[in-house]
Image (tube, grey):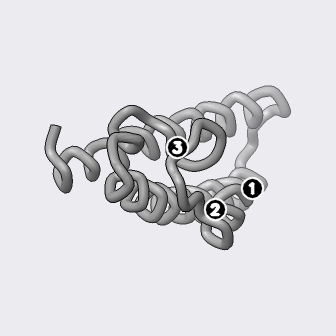
Amino acid sequence: MLSAIVMRRPPKEINDFYGHRTARSKRDQASWDFAQVYSNRVMMWMGAWNILLGVIGLFLPFSAIGGVIVSMAFMLLTLVHLYRSTERALKERFGE
């Protein structure tokens, strides 16, 4: 959902409220623009994986709390992956 919003209305200017907001992405406008596009692509892929795993999880014998724990763990991993991959791409493209 969030990636669809960012895809339709990407933040044009560096801000503290909307988009991939890290020190590296806010360094300059080129870094900011790159980070918004890159993180949105990663977010779309991770969202697709979340949906796929959610559908698969419907057929696995998890208890209610077990399903919540597995879902939350995967979402946390998704956020970590989004942050690390975007920061790595920024570092490769724009340096330190």
Count of residue discs: 3
Nearer to me, 79 or 17: 17
User: Label 3 is placed on what type of residue?
Assistant: Thr
Nearer to me, 83 or 61: 83
Residue depicted at 43% across the width and 40% down the height: 83
- Rounded to the nearest angstrom, the CA distance separating label 1 from label 3 is 22 Å
Q: In the rendered view of the protein, which quadrant contains the C terminus?
A: top left
Q: Which residue is mark 2?
A: 6
Residue 18 lies left or right of residue 96; in this view the side is right
Q: Residues within 10 Å of mark 1 (few under 14, many from 20)?
A: few
* 50 lies above or below 70: below
Q: Residues within 10 Å of mark 3 (few under 14, many from 20)?
A: some
Q: Where in the figure is residue 32, as x and y percent of width and height? A: 41, 52
Residue depicted at 48% across the width and 58% down the height: 36
Q: Where in the figure is residue 3, as x and y percent of width and height? A: 63, 61
The kind of secondary structure element at disc 3 is helix
Q: Which residue is mark 3?
A: 78
- Of tags 1 and 3, the one toward the viewer is 3
Of marks 1 and 3, which one's residue comes earlier in the chain? 1
Of marks 2 and 3, which one's residue comes earlier in the chain? 2
Residue 56 lies left or right of residue 22; in this view the side is right
> Residue 10 falls in which quadrant of the image?
bottom right
Q: Where in the figure is residue 58, as x and y percent of width and height? A: 77, 54
Which residue is situated farthest in the right direction here?
Answer: 64
The kind of secondary structure element at disc 1 is loop
User: Label 2 is placed on what type of residue?
Assistant: Val
Q: Which residue is mark 1?
A: 59
User: Label 1 is placed on what type of residue?
Assistant: Phe
Q: Residues within 10 Å of mark 2 (few under 14, many from 20)?
A: some
- Rounded to the nearest angstrom, the CA distance separating label 2 from label 3 is 17 Å
- Rounded to the nearest angstrom, the CA distance separating label 2 from label 1 is 32 Å
